[in-house]
Amino acid sequence: MVGNTGVVKTDTLSPQAGKRGGRGPGRRGPSWPTHLALIVAVIIISTPLIFALIKATQASSQVISPNMLPGTSFMDNLSSIWVDAKLGRYMLNSTIVAICVTTGKTILALLAALAFVYFRFPLKSAAFTLVLLSLMLPTEVLIIALFDLVSRDLKWANTFAAIIVPFLASATGTFLFRQHFLNIPTSLADAARIDGCGPLRYLTRILIPMSWNTIGALAVIQFVYAWDQYIWPLVIVQQDEKQVVQVGLRKLIEVGGQTDWGAVMAGAIITMLPPLIVFTLLQEQFSRGFALSEDK
Amino acid sequence: MLKPAQTTANTEANAVFRGAAMPWFFLLPSLLILAVFIYLPALQTLRLAAFKANLILGTERFVGLQNVTELLLSPAYRQVALQTLIFMVLTVTLGLLFSLGLAWLASRPIRGSKYYRLLLIYPYALSPAIAGTLWLFMFNPEIGVVNQLLGSLFSIKPRWLDDPILAFGLVVVAAIWKGLAYNIVFYLASIQNLPGDVMEAAEIDGATPAQVFWRVAFPLLTPITFFLVFTNIISALFDSFALTDILTRGGPYFHNAGITTFLVYQLYQDGFVNFKSGVAAAQAALMLVLVAFITFMQFKVGERRVHYGG
């Protein structure tokens, strides 16, 4: 039980305050039921991951046994999958793709939001609607025609362009930046313009430094989205050399009837790392970026 | 956050910079990509749906609405649609319920709440494909840890992936588990923005914790709940592909189709395994209508509810 030295006045005023299991944030009460519930939840949520982590360290004889003690074979498992099963190659490909998509999406969305917020021009709402409506058309729905276009007309099958370029425009990013820019006082832009500052300079010198939380929040979402790509690379990339790691995982399981599960678990753990690292690095911006836009 | 109600409101308010070509110059990259890789394929999908086409052979024959009517009359496709609906309803309702509860608990002013929050949201970094891989190993009937445990405790070894009911349940639970972190992130952000004074006032007036939650906090959380309902519907429709592809490969056969064959999986099967492009495009066209309807509802509902947040 945690001794809370917070405000006491609610207790004396509220007849219910003495009751157990107070729930509202800011409310006092015994906290052990909350701790208990959260600990149970965290354990349940983490079980598959802990399981994977332990199995990734065991030698192949232990992996298929109920033994749940960590072993010492992590590096063996990893090296067998990193080189033999090309995980290293897949990881590199995914990293390149995810970084390109994230950077490209952020830049394009910033430019689009700049146009929508600081300019008045004919057909503006039509252009805005066009961006807005693209949310209704996920890749999965377009996959037949997109495959046709990218492989037959553009001849991009088995290239990085095929898994990067179609994803560079971001409706979500455009809206988020637009929303954020609208909250920045116009007087700032007016002053900048009077000082002879053009829109691009205003974007790079003033808007971007004021938008790191939003950029961070968006970067996390976009990186994770790009990293998780699955169905599109599965159909458009046939060469192992160009394949991404999510589809690579599928190939690791497919190998004959004998799956080397210890190695696969080591692969799964490694595959989780890049988004986890991005998420950890930008965690602060991620939470604040959303808190900020939720304000209104 | 996407709040459609606000998006068009003050578009015209501030036009600081001048220049007729300049804004188009900034918009061009985005619009070009959208036109080529979203709108063109969308139109092409509608066109392809009216043809019996074979992408491999490059042949096409116009059949009008025949592909669509065939689909709607096909018992297998109707089963797939129904399965998708059940999967969607289960994962969305249960997933949001658990997420809201956990986010609420983790928002309480208790010691270490920061760490609980982190431990609840880090699985966001986990992909559906990895989720499928982990669950495939855990629930392997012979060497999976679940059956080894059940075998030694109760001497049972269920065939998780061969039994239709078990396979379906497994996919539902895995999908809920996979979705928790995402939902908790958004609920946590919203709960932190709740007006503390309103809830304190309710407490002072003698509201029980349950009353504070259901009468005060929950209504204030409706906008985010609606947003999450729609994003969860979309992810149940689409993100389930990687999970089911790795975990069950469409699932054991049940009546007319695999039990965990959902709409996108069927689309992929017909388009890229059976090479029936026309039929697949017709499915895509139907899904397009479905997604358009869902998005329309999101805006409709969103517009009505969004002011709650005030």
Image: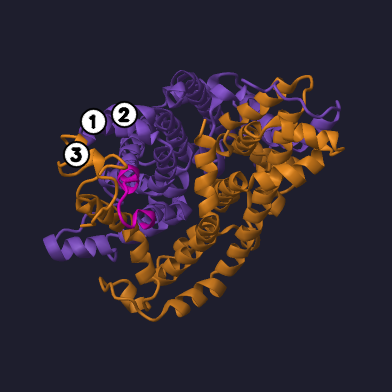
Chain colours: A orange, B purple
Residue B108 part of the magenta-drawn span: yes
Same chain for the residues at labels 2 and 1, yes or no? yes
Q: Amino acid at mark 3?
A: Thr
Q: Secondary structure at mark 2?
A: helix
Would you name the residue on which mark 2 appears?
Answer: B216
**Where residue A202 sits in the image (x, y, percent)?**
78, 41
Measure the alpha-carbon separation of dots 2 and 1: 7 Å
Measure the alpha-carbon separation of dots 3 and 1: 19 Å
**Front residue of this view, candidates B76 and A88:** A88
Label 2: chain? Answer: B
**Where residue B30 sits in the image (x, y, percent)?**
72, 36
Q: Amino acid at mark 2?
A: Val
Would you name the residue on which mark 1 appears?
Answer: B211
Q: Which mark is residue A12?
A: 3
Would residue B55 be seen by someone viewing this image from the given angle?
no
**Where residue B95 sits in the image (x, y, percent)?**
34, 40
| Location of residue A253 (image quadrant) | bottom left
In the image: residue A288, left or right of residue B259: right
Do callouts 3 and 2 mark residues in contact (Cβ within 8 Å)?
Answer: no
